C-alpha cells in the first residue's frame, strides 16, 4: 500500500526576500515546487498539498526566549534597517528585511503542521521543504535562521510523550537542534556534515555526545572536504542507520539540505543525487512516521532537483534521469546549464579522497567506541536481543 503523504507549501513564500546579494534565495522553494509540478508530483493520489498555518507563539516559547521574540516582532514592522548583534540580527548572514518574522513564523508553522499531520491525521510522511533552520538558538539568530522550526516541531512531539530521532544531512552541523536536546534521552540527534575545523558553525565533533541523561544521544560525523558519494553513504550506513534502527523512534525528523552537493557555491563536499537518494530510500524503508524539512542549498537548481527527488521517493515514484525540457527552458536564462535530474556516482580525486576516507574511518571508530555501547546496547537489551 502506498504512503499517505503531505507536502507543506505556501504561495506566500514568494513575498519574502533576504536580499538580491544574499546566498539564501527564497525562490528556490518555488522553483522546487515548479519542478515537482512539471513531473506531475503535485497531483498524486494519496499525496496532499497542505498550506502553511502560522505557528502559535506558545509553541515558540518552548525553545525561544520572550525577549528574543519581542525583538523579532519589533524589527519585523520597521521600515528602516535595524540591527541588534546581541540577538544575531542585522549582520550579513541574518539581515533584517521587511516581514522577516512573518516569514519565520510561516515556515515554522509549516514544520509544526507536518509534525501534527503524521501524529494526528494519519499521514505517513510530511515534507515541509521551506523548513530546516537548524542554526537558530534560543535567543540568537544564526546561519540564515531566525526561528528553529525543527526544535519547535520536535517539542510538540515530546509533549505527546513521543520519542524522536533527528537526522541532519545538511553540509552544516545542526548545532541549534543539538543544543536544544543535548541533555535528554528522548531525542536522538545525528548530524553528518562538513567538519567544523574550518567551516561554519565550528561545532559538531565526535566528542560532542550529550550530557546527563542525554549522554550518547548526540551523534556527529564530521566530514573532510571532498568527501564523495561512497564516503557519504559509508557514514550513513555505518553510523546513522544502525543507530536510528536501534533507537526505533516514534517519529523520524530529517533535515535534507542539498548544500552537500559538489556544485554548491558555499561548501566543499562532493555529494550528488546518487548518495542523496540512496539515503532517502533507506529512511523510507524504516517505515517510521516521517517529518522532513528542507534546509540548506545555495545552487537553486540543485535544491529543486534534490527536493523533487525526495518527494518522488516519499511517494514511490520513479523519476526519469533528465529534467523536463519545459523546466530546462526556465532555468536556462538563470545561468544553469544542467539538464540532468539524476547524477552518476561521483568519486573525488585520489589524494583528496584518501584524506577524506581516513577522516571518516576515524570518526566511525570513535562513534562506535563512545556511542554504540550506549544506544545499541540499551535498545538491543530492551528488545531482548
Image (tube, rainbow, N blue to C red):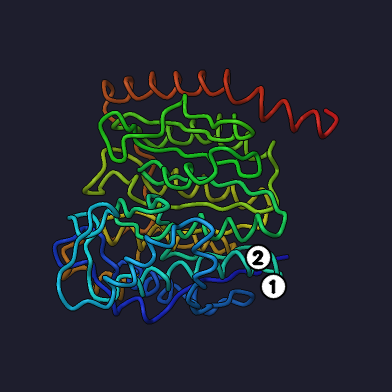
- Badge 1 element: loop
319 or 197: nearer the viewer:
197
Q: Position of residue 284 (x, y in %)?
A: 61, 53
Who's the residue at 45% across and 75% down the image? 9
Residue 19 lies, with reference to residue 326, above or below; the image says above
Q: Position of residue 186 (x, y in %)?
A: 66, 44
Q: Quarter-wise, where is residue 112 in the image?
A: bottom right
Q: Are marks 1 and 2 in contact (CB under 8 Å)?
A: yes
58 or 296: nearer the viewer:
58
Spot the residue most to the right.
384
In the rendered structure, the answer to whether residue 355 lies left or right of residue 240 reads left
Instruction: Report crowding for label 2: few under 14, some 14 to 19, many 20 or more residues within 10 A (C-alpha).
Output: many
Who's the residue at 63% across and 70% down the image? 117
Instruction: Report crowding for label 1: few under 14, some 14 to 19, many 20 or more residues within 10 A (C-alpha).
Output: few
Q: Is residue 45 visible?
A: yes
In the rendered structure, the answer to whether residue 46 lies left or right of residue 232 reads right
Residue 17 lies, with reference to residue 369, above or below; the image says below
In the rendered structure, the answer to whether residue 64 lies left or right of residue 226 reads right
Residue 254 lies, with reference to residue 36, above or below; the image says above
Tell me the distance, in whole angstroms, between the alpha carbons under discs 1 and 2: 6 Å
Q: Is residue 337 visible?
A: no
Mark 1 sits on what residue?
A: 121
Q: Position of residue 225 (x, y in %)?
A: 29, 31
The quadrant in which the N terminus is found is: bottom right
Mark 2 sits on what residue?
A: 118
Who's the residue at 34% across and 72% down the image? 73
- Badge 2 element: helix
Who's the residue at 37% across and 58% down the image? 341
Mark seen at residue 163:
none
The quadrant in which the C terminus is found is: top right
Amino acid at each position: 500500500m502506498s504512503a499517505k503523504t503531505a507536502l507543506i507549501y505556501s504561495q506566500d513564500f514568494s513575498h519574502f526576500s533576504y536580499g538580491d546579494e544574499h546566498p539564501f534565495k527564497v525562490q528556490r522553494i518555488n522553483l522546487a515546487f515548479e519542478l515537482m509540478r512539471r513531473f506531475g508530483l503535485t497531483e498524486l493520489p494519496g499525496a496532499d498539498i497542505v498550506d502553511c498555518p502560522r505557528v502559535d507563539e506558545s509553541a515558540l516559547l518552548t525553545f525561544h526566549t520572550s525577549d528574543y521574540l519581542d525583538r523579532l516582532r519589533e524589527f519585523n514592522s520597521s521600515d528602516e534597517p535595524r540591527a541588534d548583534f546581541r540577538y544575531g540580527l542585522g549582520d550579513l548572514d541574518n539581515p533584517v528585511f521587511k516581514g522577516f518574522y512573518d516569514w519565520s513564523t510561516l515556515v515554522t508553522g509549516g514544520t509544526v503542521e507536518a509534525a501534527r499531520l503524521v501524529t494526528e491525521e494519519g499521514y505517513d510522511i510530511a515534507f515541509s521543504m521551506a523548513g530546516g533552520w537548524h542554526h537558530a538558538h534560543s535567543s540568537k539568530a544564526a546561519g540564515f535562521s531566525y526561528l528553529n522550526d525543527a526544535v519547535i516541531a520536535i517539542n510538540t512531539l515530546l509533549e505527546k510523550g513521543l520519542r524522536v530521532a533527528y537526522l541532519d544531512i545538511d553540509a552544516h552541523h545542526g548545532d541549534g537542534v543539538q543544543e536544544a536536546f543535548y541533555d535528554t534521552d528522548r531525542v536522538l540527534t545525528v548530524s553528518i556534515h562538513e567538519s567544523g575545523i574550518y567551516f561554519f558553525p565550528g561545532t559538531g565533533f565526535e566528542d560532542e555526545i550529550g550530557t546527563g541523561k542525554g549522554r550518547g544521544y548526540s551523534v556527529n560525523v564530521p566530514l573532510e572536504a571532498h568527501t564523495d558519494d561512497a564516503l557519504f553513504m559509508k557514514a550513513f550506513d555505518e553510523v546513522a542507520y544502525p543507530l536510528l534502527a536501534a533507537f526505533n523512534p516514534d517519529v523520524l525528523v530529517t533535515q535534507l539540505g542539498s548544500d552537500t552537493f559538489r556544485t554548491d557555491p558555499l561548501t566543499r563536499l562532493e555529494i550528488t543525487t546518487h548518495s542523496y537518494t540512496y539515503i532517502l530510500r533507506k529512511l523510507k524503508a524504516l517505515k517510521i512516521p516521517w517529518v522532513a524539512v528542507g534546509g540548506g542549498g545555495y545552487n537553486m537548481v540543485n535544491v529543486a532537483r534534490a527536493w523533487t527527488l525526495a518527494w518522488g521517493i516519499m511517494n514511490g515514484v520513479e523519476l526519469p534521469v533528465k529534467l523536463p525540457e519545459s523546466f530546462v527552458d526556465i532555468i536556462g536564462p538563470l545561468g544553469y546549464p544542467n539538464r540532468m535530474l539524476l547524477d552518476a556516482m561521483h568519486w573525488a580525486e585520489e589524494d583528496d579522497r584518501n584524506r577524506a576516507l581516513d577522516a571518516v574511518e576515524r570518526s566511525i571508530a570513535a562513534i562506535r567506541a563512545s556511542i554504540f555501547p550506549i544506544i545499541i546496547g540499551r535498545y538491543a537489551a530492551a528488545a531482548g536481543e
